[in-house]
Amino acid sequence: MTTDAALDTPSRQSPATLRVRRGPALRGTLVPPGDKSISHRAFLLATLATGTTEIRAALESGDCGHSVAAAAALGCRIWREDGATYVDSPGLRGLHEPAAAIDCGRSGTTMRLLCGLLAGRPFPTFLIADPQLAQRPMGRVLAPLAAMDAQFLARSGGTRAPIAFAGSGLHGHRHVLRVASAQVKSALLLAGLDAVGPTEVVEPGPARDHTERMLLAQGAPLTSGVGAEGRWHRITRLTEPLSPLRLTVPADPSSAAFPLVAACLVPGSHVWLRNVGLNPTRAGIVRVLQRMGARITLHAERMTGGEPVADLEIEAGPLHGTEVAGEEVVTLIDELPILAVAAACAIGQTTVRDAAELRVKETDRIACTAEQLQAMGADITATPDGWQIGGGTLRGAAVHSHGDHRLAMALTVAGLVASGLTRVDDAACAADSYPGFVGDLRALGALIDDLETPAC
Ligand code: S3P
């Protein structure tokens, strides 16, 4: 059972079409919204603990609403009180069969984490997806779960949603991942809590580690280390109840990246972004922008909700091209579209390599980012695993997000530095991760008009 309020998360309420103009310097202070990855995990991992988890400053977005609804469907009671969200769970072994299919919407994190959480439950579950998510690869989670004896049926030969889990016993397995993916790593660790025998995950790169931090804080039987093949994690079947947490979610560095790059690029800008998560597995965008010459100063570095955070002070200034490749890529994978905007406005060449994963995000972000920035006059060429970007200037154009929240926001920021007018179509999807995006940029002085406001 749940209250309606807890599920009433904003979805696509921002304007559908934006008109953006180059404007005055950006000035002021923002607290970007709660971290999406941590919020999903807070809601979903709360179902594992026995008792009431208290979550403050969680992201209330379309995507995270699906994780809240999933926790409710599995038998958790969820309510809001005094600015916090509470999830009261009977614990992993007390979860019950949902009355209907769980709708993951367009949220890849909800779907992949649920695959791990549900594969070993002793009841059947059905996961359904929006058409965009139904195109994304699920075999990377389902194939390793099959190696743990998970029983399921999924479209496209077991590689795409919808997915039906039969509810079967699992066995521990040693997984050596080929792709650095936090969603896959997390799903396998969650499945390991239900498996007979230890489950090991060896990862090829430093994918975000929020699941490991949260599981450890809950008291899960998890150990990690570094071996010849890379970083490994080992988890064993849950025998003791996990402890519910009280946590405050830091601001999302992936959302902060949009005002961050805008403040770097719009001449004369001086902006503060407070309480931004700077987990080393997520902070690549700050490191790369600093390498490009950005004037970003970290203040008051501290811990919030088991995660490192800081206040960022940003002053505009010229940027220089750089090279992004190898292990660094996974630490800024979601920020690459906005980094492409920064690179298109920098002095000199930027090369992004080893980022083929971008082709299987909400859109093919390599192709879509290149096409849309080319329409704005950028010297950007898509390669199989990234871009070649020659720095220069942008001109206003009519561009399209293709329903991809990060592309919508990257193009809006591009419009703030382009000459003339930029029209961003299908921009409402920004609400998937940053419901207050337009309002926050306007509060800093950005010139953004709504051309249409949808009825929803
Ligand atoms: C996420 C992991 C990343 C990231 C996604 C969120 C997560 O995906 O791109 O936006 O919360 O675990 P992969 O796990 O596919 O790399």
Image (tube, rainbow, N blue to C red):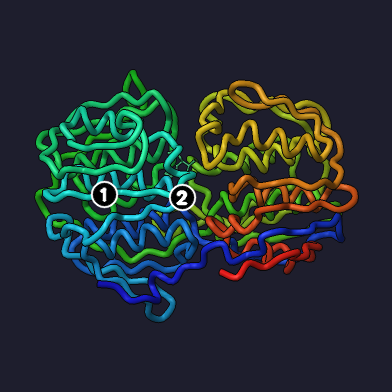
Which residue carries the number 1 mark?
126
Residue at horizontal 21 percent and vertical 49 percent from the top = 220
> Looking at the picture, how far across and down is residue 35, in whole percent?
49, 56
Residue at horizontal 48 percent and vertical 52 percent from the top = 308
Residue at horizontal 75 percent and vertical 29 percent from the top = 380
Farthest-out residue, bottom? 82
The answer to whether one can see residue 332 in this image is no
Residue at horizontal 74 percent and vertical 43 percent from the top = 294
Q: Secondary structure at mark 1?
A: strand
Amino acid type at image mark 2: Arg
> Looking at the picture, how far across and down is residue 7, in whole percent?
39, 69
- Ligand 1 closer than 8 Å to label 1 CB: no
Farthest-out residue, right? 420
* Left-right relation of 431 to 395: left
Q: Secondary structure at mark 2?
A: loop
Judging depth in this view, the residue of 298 and 130 nearest the camera is: 130
* Left-right relation of 117 to 348: left
Tell me the quadrant of ligand 1.
Answer: top left
> Looking at the picture, how far across and down is residue 208, in whole percent?
43, 41
Image quadrant in which the N terminus is located:
bottom left
Determine whether 387 is above or below 421 in the image. above
Which residue carries the number 2 mark?
106
Judging depth in this view, the residue of 185 and 140 nearest the camera is: 140
Q: Which mark is residue 81?
A: none
Determine whether 309 is above or below 370 in the image. below
Determine whether 400 is above or below 177 in the image. below
